[in-house]
Amino acid sequence: MMNDIPTHTGLEAVDAGLAFPFTALIGQPDLQQALLLAAIDPGLGGVLVSGPRGTAKSTAARALAELLPEGQLVTLPLAASEDRVTGSLDLNAALQDNALRFSPGLLARAHLGVLYVDEINLLPDALVDALLDAAASGINTVERDGVSYSHATRFALIGTMNPEEGELRPQLLDRFGLMVQLHNCFDPAVRQQIVKARLAFELDPPAFRARFAAQQQAQIAQIREARTRLASLAFDDAVHARVSALCIAAAVDGLRADLVMLRAARALAALDGAEHITIAHVDAVAAAVLAHRRMVPPGPQQPDAPQPGTSGPDDRQVAGDNELDAPAQAAGAEGDWGYLPPETAGLKPVKGVLPLPPKKP
C-alpha cells in the first residue's frame, strides 16, 4: 500500500518560528550550494555538514526549510525510537477489523520538507541507515508480522556533526550524497559581518527578514523552476568522461560517487538555468561529492606514463647484488605503503649436518 502523507502549506509551517533568511547567510557559499542541490533533487541522498560548534550548521538547515514548497522542518531528536522515526502499524486493528492503521513517524512529517538531524554521528547505525534509505529511495516502508505500509518520503536530509565527538562509519558516510566541511572563520571582516547580521536579526526578526524578502522569493522561484527543468537535462560523453576521471583519481569505492556527481551536476545546471550540463558544473560539485569518499588526498596530477624507449620509474638498474637503485626505492616508498626492496638471500653452509648417503645403483 502506497500513500502520500499530507503536509501543511505556507512558510509559517517552519517549526522553529521565524528563521534566519537563507539568502542572508554570510561566508558559507559551499554549504548554501550543497543545500540547494539537495532541495532541488532530494534523491541525491542528503547533505552531511561537518564542522565545529558555532559555524551556522543548524541555522542553515532551518533557513533552507523556508525555501521549500511546504516550509516544513522536522528535527529528529537523539533519543528518538525507530517507531517514532519510521512510523508504526496497529496490528490489532489489522487482525480484528481488517483495516490498516498507520501512525505516521518523523519521516512522514518531513515529506516535501527538510529532515534535520543534529549530531547524526551519535545516532545508532541502524537508525542512520533507515534515514539514508528513505532519503535516497523516496519511500519508507514499515513492516510488522507480514503487514506492510509504504509512503513517499521526498525530503532534503541534512545531518550535522562535530568531528570532535566521533565519526560515522565509512559505510554510512558513503550513503550521504554530499558532504561539506566547515571551519572556523579567522577573517576579521567576515566575522564582523556575520556578527552584525546575527545581532540585527535577534534585535528585530521581522524587520531583518523584510530586508531579504525579495531575495527569498527569488530563491524560492529559482528552486521551483529548477525542479521542473531537472528531467530535461541530459549528460553528454564529455561530462561522463570528466566524472569518471575525477572519481578514478580519488580512488573511490564503487560507483555511487559517479552517480551522485552526475545528479549533482544536473541539479546545479538546473539551478543556474543552463541549457546543458557542462564540465564546469561537474567541477563545481566534485568537492562535495568526494569529500567523504576520497581514498587518496588531492594533489597535483601525476606525470604521464613514459613512452617506450624513455626512462621512467619502471626502468630499474639491477646491480650485482640484486638491489634496487635509490630512485626506485624512493618511488616504491611513496607509491606503496609497506613496500620493501628485495634483498640478497645468501647461502651459508650449515655445520653439523651429515651428508646424505649415496644412492644405490
Image (cartoon, grey):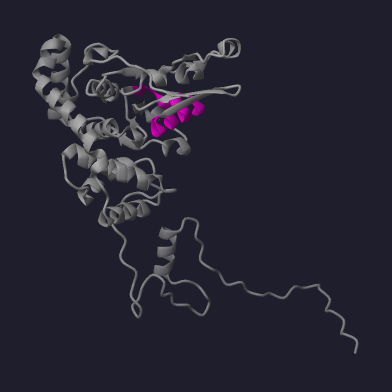
Residue at image location 31% in from the left, 67% down from the top: 304
**Which residue ends up furthest to the bottom in the rendered image?**
361
Above/below status of 360 relative to 151: below
Q: Predominant secondary structure in magenta?
A: helix
- Quadrant for residue 197, please give it: top left
Q: Quadrant of the C terminus?
A: bottom right
What is the quadrant of residue 111 in the picture? Answer: top left
Question: Is 84 placed above or below 186 here?
Answer: above
x and y, in percent, of residue 73 in the image: 31, 18
**What x and y, as percent, mark residue 118?**
37, 22
Q: Position of residue 1 (x, y in %)?
A: 48, 24
**Residue at position x 42%, y 39% from top?**
174
Q: Is residue 58 left or right of residue 101?
A: left
Q: Which residues are magenta?
A: 115-138
Residue that extends furthest to the right in the rendered view of this protein: 360
Asked if residue 128 lies in the magenta stretch, the reply is yes
334 vs 172, nearest the viewer: 172
